[in-house]
Structures are given as C-alpha cells and as structure tokens.
Amino acid sequence: MSRIGKKGIAIPDKTEVTMTAGLFKAKGPKGTLERNFRPEISITVGDKEVTLAIAKETNLTKALWGTYASHVKNIIQGVTEGFEKKLILEGVGFKSKVNGNKLELALGFSHPVNVDIPEGLEVKAEKNNITVSGVDKGLVGSFTAKVRDLKKPEPYKGKGFRYHDEIIRRKQGKKSV
C-alpha cells in the first residue's frame, strides 16, 4: 500500500482544482496545468483536499497510486509556487546568454551552441549562472538536464555545467616523477 497515496493533498488558497473525465486541471497564480490520468485510480477533489483511491487492487494500480499522488502534488505546487533549477557554468572562456527564445552558449567548441527554450519556461543567464523556472516540474528538469548534457563537468578541473548544489568529485591528475 502506498504511504504517499493514502495521504490527502492540500489545496492552497487562490488555487482552483477540477477533475473531469480523467483530466485533472489546476489553475493558480503562476499559471495552469492539466494532465490525463487513467481511470483505475479515482481522484476526488474536495473543498480543501484532493484524495486518491484504488478502484481495483492490482500490481499496476498499487504502483500508480503513489505515482499519481506525486504528480497531483507537483501540479498543485507548480501552479502556486513554481519550480526552479540553477546551473553553474565553470571554465575559462565559457559564456552563456539568452537571446529571444534561444540560449546561446560558448562551450569551447569551434562553434556556438544554440538551444531552443521550450514554451512555458523562463531562462535567465547572469554571468555564468543559468536559472530555469516554470510551472511544470518535468519540463524544468528535462530542459536543465538537456543543457547540462552539452558539457558535463569533468573531474580534473571541474569545467562544464553543474547544478548549484552538486559537488564534483575531483581527481588528482598526473603525478610528476
């Protein structure tokens, strides 16, 4: 049984939540999100709380119960507070800037790297700190992971993209005799 699925999810003030025909919608101060859910898990919207229950107990529904509870919680948190991830670009000559809906990066290659910013995300680049924020947790996480994959941090000097709370394990390098 899911410990996460058993708990009710509180609906904050200034947030409207509806569930109709498998479509869960949430509207808050930061924006709106909607998501389709399978009918095996019944999602009930009350006055101040959203509850989830299993219609028929199978291995699939037991697995989906906690997952759907996390999705609902993330949707409600996204429309009320939003999500934010920060990347730090380290390295001599590495630069980043936002130009329209593109993120322009100079990563030591022979050419600049341009990354399209998806709709619904706000990206800020100050010096070598990139901040990605939005209402959809999955979109924020996948975009920052995509940008980080362009130049992963290397273990000798630490050059490349790293998350602001990430610690890079450093290696010693060559020893001279």
Image (cartoon, helix red, strand yellow):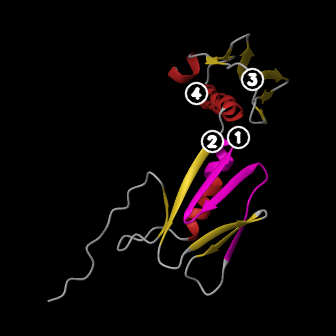
Q: Residues within 10 Å of mark 1 (few under 14, many from 20)?
A: many
Residues 29 and 159: in front is 29
Q: Amino acid at mark 1?
A: Val
Q: Secondary structure at mark 2?
A: strand
Q: CA distance from mark 1 to mark 3?
A: 13 Å
What amino acid is labelled 2 in the image?
A: Phe
Q: Which residues are magenta?
A: 113-141
Q: Residue at x 69, y 33 (%)?
A: 75
Nearest-to-viewer mark from 4 and 2: 2
User: Can you identify the residue that label 1 sits on?
Assistant: 135
Image coords of residue 68 (percent x, y): 65, 29
Contact check, label 1 and label 2, Cβ < 8 Å: yes
Binning the other alpha carbons within 10 Å of mark 4 as few (below 14), some (14 to 19) or many (20 upward) gives some
Q: Which residue is mark 2?
A: 83
> Residue 94 or 139: which is nearer the viewer?
94
Residue beneath label 4, please? 66
Labels 1 and 4 touching (C-beta < 8 A): no
* Label 3 packing within 10 angstroms: few (<14), some (14-19), many (20+): some
Task: State the quadrant of the C terminus.
Answer: bottom left
Label 4 to label 2: alpha-carbon separation: 21 Å
Residue 102 within the segment the image draws in magenta: no
Q: Amino acid at mark 3?
A: Thr
Q: Is residue 138 left or right of residue 100?
A: left
